[in-house]
Image (cartoon, rainbow, N blue to C red):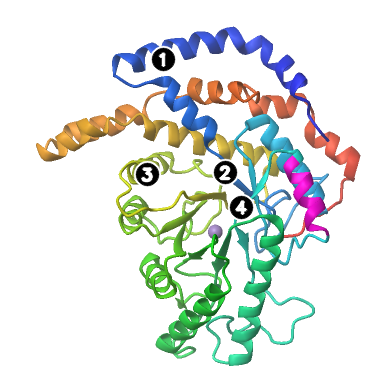
Amino acid sequence: MIISKDKIQDLNQKGLAEQAESFGFLKLALDKKGVDAETIVQHLADFQVAIPSWALGAGGTRFGRFSAGGEPSTLEQKIEDIGLIHCLTQTAGAVSLHIPWDIPSDPEAIKQLADSHGIAFDAVNSNTFQNQADQTFSYKYGSLADRQQAVREQAIAHNQEVIRIGKALGSQSLTVWLADGASFPGQNNFRKSLQHTQRALQEIYSELPADWRMFIEYKPYEPYFYSTVIQDWGTSLLLAEGCGEKAFCLVDLGHHLPNTNIEQIVATLMMKGKLGGFHFNDSKYGDDDLTVGSIKPYQLFLIFNELVYGMNNNEANNPPLAWMIDASHNLKDPLEDLIQSLEAIQLAYAQALLVNTPALEEAQIQNDVVLGQELLQDAYRTDVRPLIREARLRRQGALDPIAAYRSFDVRNELVRERGLKTVATGL
Ligand SMILES: [Mn+2]
């Protein structure tokens, strides 16, 4: 299914006057505060987030999976689905492939298809947390950290293969997330597991093309529940520094223990120039993988505040970040969920761009704690939706992407095209 720009423009017509009014009103209000709305709109229009190839089907929990109907069963169909989200939101201009769930049989053709939808290939993700049918050794007890050299070599070779696939598609980064860990004390030797991991990452790193980056993701627990080899940002940073200047940490919002101050982690990693990638989701209890912004939108804003500060005060030369949505659940239409995610990310980014940083720094110098909080909350409590709609309009996206998605009856159309019982590869 393809939605033409004309159809979107037609649909936008009836909301244009109201949008002009609310944007004009907010623009004036921001003007009085010395904030240029046009600059913010441009930042928002330029901001693109990668959609992972496994997020287009209904997600699963360990208990069950309920198909959304019309799910994409090939990589081509997944790209088409991202194309649908992108034409409505103008924010999903990239795809992040998960290997081996989505190995392209014809990279050149896939590249052209993605290009026709305005979609680039972001980080490629390796997978050594599952066994594949044709592999020799099992990852049951570990992969890059495993005690057996043969298992580690197999996992290293897989990551190097993922780099080769990514190269053929024009991707420029590899994300490594390890499930390696232990569920019981005595199961693993902590030091040896970490040493094996460091050496294995160095070997993968040695195959990294000159213009590539490697992202090392951390997670405190799950799938194992006593220890995880790369458990936190400190371990990730230690491993990245042990590899070299093209290795960076990746922050996944759900990969923290409850109430961890993620914004502070962001500030620390950007101070070191070592924050490479970001995975968006939200959680109430653990790695719940809920829609970003659905549970803790204020935390998301505080994180973006640090990201914006880090990008504007980039003494350590932190590279531009790779942004990706990494959520999975089994309730909503996955495409509607991704549209909501993109909106939540844009909201937090826009709010963070409104923060009066010089005034905040002055309040900090004066120990004016109340004013510091006021300044942050003034930005957070501003209704920035007219700015986001304006950014979408200028790129010929939909004023209201969810309403447009429903008005074009996208899900039913996809069911008609693909059938009710198709299942997307992935989780
Ligand atoms: Mn992740």
**Residue placed under numbered mark 4 in the picture:** 122
Horizontal and vertical percent position of residue 49: 57, 43
**Residue placed under numbered mark 2 in the picture:** 49
- Tell us which disc is closer to us: 3 or 1: 3
**Residue placed under numbered mark 3 in the picture:** 311
Determine whether the beta carbon of the residue marked 3 sits less than 8 angstroms from the nearest atom of ligand 1.
no
Q: Is residue 339 magenta?
A: no
Q: Amino acid at mark 1?
A: Lys
Residue at mark 3 to residue at mark 1: CA–CA distance: 24 Å
Horizontal and vertical percent position of residue 180: 54, 77
Residues under numbered marks 2 and 1 in contact, where contact means CB atoms less than 8 Å apart: no
- Secondary structure at numbered mark 1: helix
Q: Earlier in the sequence, mark 3 or mark 1?
A: 1
Q: Earlier in the sequence, mark 2 or mark 4?
A: 2
- Tell us which disc is closer to us: 2 or 3: 3
Q: Work out whether residue 407 can be spotted.
A: yes
Q: Main secondary structure of the magenta part?
A: helix
Which residue occupies 32% across, 42% down?
A: 309
Residue at mark 3 to residue at mark 4: CA–CA distance: 20 Å
Q: Is residue 21 above or below residue 199?
A: above
Q: Please tell me which residue lies in front, 257 or 278.
A: 278
Q: Residues within 10 Å of mark 3 (few under 14, many from 20)?
A: some
**Residue placed under numbered mark 1 in the picture:** 27
